[in-house]
Image (tube, rainbow, N blue to C red):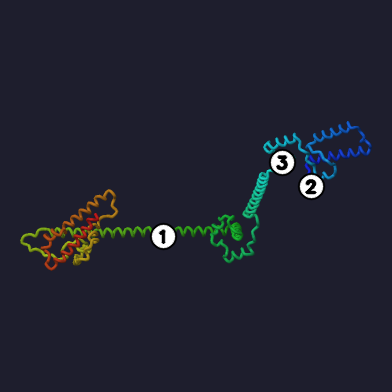
Amino acid sequence: MPKLHLKRTPEEEAARQWRKQQKKEAKRRRKHGLEEYDDDAEDSAHRSRKKSRRNSPIDHPSQKWDSEDEDFIGPQPEPESSSSKSKSKSKEHSKNAYDPYSHAYKPDYDSIRAEVEDQRFREKLSMAFEDDERLDSVEARFNAFAHVPRHWGGGSAGQSGSHGGNSRINYDDDDFMRIDPMTLDEEEYVEWIRAGMYRKTHAQEYEEKERKKAERAAKRAQEKAFREESERLEKEAAEERRRRKQEREFRKWDYAREEYNERWKQLLAPVPAGEPDITLGFDDVPWPIASAQQQKPSKKGNSTSKAIEVSLNDLTRDAISLFLFSTTVSSVPSSNQERSKKDRKDKLRETFLRFHPDKFEGRVMPRVKEDERDRVRQALGIVVRALNDLMEQG
């Protein structure tokens, strides 16, 4: 097994030099005959040598040999005495204090491993910080536009500007100049610089261009205002026409309802004495629909009115409801809701009393022609059922 070459500490090196000096001194004395001295002197020298070893920085054990082999082997441990044993025991019980020069020292590999891992982590963290700083500086340098851009007269920049490949054509001149140059690529930045330089060197041309642009903008604004005003007037005219048409419709319904009520009054009025009783046909009965009433004469003075023609298919629930409640405004204020409901019920009750089967049979049916009584009874049943449905709806 080869010898272990251990590295000496400074204290061990000092002790080694001291021993070599002592050996040289002893050799010199033997050479000059100074070694004949009595046993007392030798004992005193031996005691002084032991005392000097105890006063050295570290107690080193006595050697059985004094040769140059100690340069490679190092100091040897001395045999344990009772005092050294007590000292080693006290050291073992003193919280495992770190003493690298004690031969009973046992290293704590877990703490050493933890310390090494912590040191490696700190080194990696510092390297990561250095990488971040380097990348930040590179990004700042590239974004600072400190480099001189490529000349716009050659390369792809000039070609893209001449052929319309550059994205600058998507912007107006002023909008393009207001763009943040930090967001542009190299070719767009070249165009941005060129536009700014052209604007400075052709100030008069630029002012004329701006004046024409302002005139066009004012003209567009005027045309827009004219269109908006025309649309507003057209909407107002359409609303006025709709309102007048609705008013005419309401007047037409009001006239039809007045005609309906007047015919019922004439039908239920007693026949004067001496006058013949008038027979009624199907169309002569005042049915509760608009088509069964006479139309209002026009303002031109035309008194000719169209003959009334009513069929069973005209007597529907929707036609009856429209005739009875057409003048009722749909958007009635909340304060008039109850009154509108009451008026609706009153109209339904009045109409139902007029077309009650028993009363109608006693007052109207005797005056109807014999050949049209069955048709009148069918129409009466349709009207009664429609009125019942409307009353259930409320």
Image quadrant assignment for residue 80: top right
Q: Is residue 198 visible?
A: no
Residue 12 in percent (x, y) is at 79, 40
Q: Secondary structure at mark 3?
A: loop
The three-letter code of the residue at mark 3 reads: Tyr
Residue 50 vertical position relative to residue 377 in the rendered view, above or below: above
The three-letter code of the residue at mark 1 reads: Arg
Residue toward you, 279 or 237: 279
Q: Residue furthest right?
A: 33
Residue under label 1, please give it.
227
- The residue at 92%/34% (across/down) is 36
Q: Are marks 3 and 1 in contact (CB under 8 Å)?
A: no
Residue toward you, 337 or 29: 29
Residue under label 2, please give it.
5
Residue under label 3, please give it.
105
Front tag of 3 and 1: 3
- The residue at 21%/53% (across/down) is 345
Residue 147 in percent (x, y) is at 65, 56
- The mark nearer the N terminus, 2 or 3, is 2
Q: How many marks?
A: 3
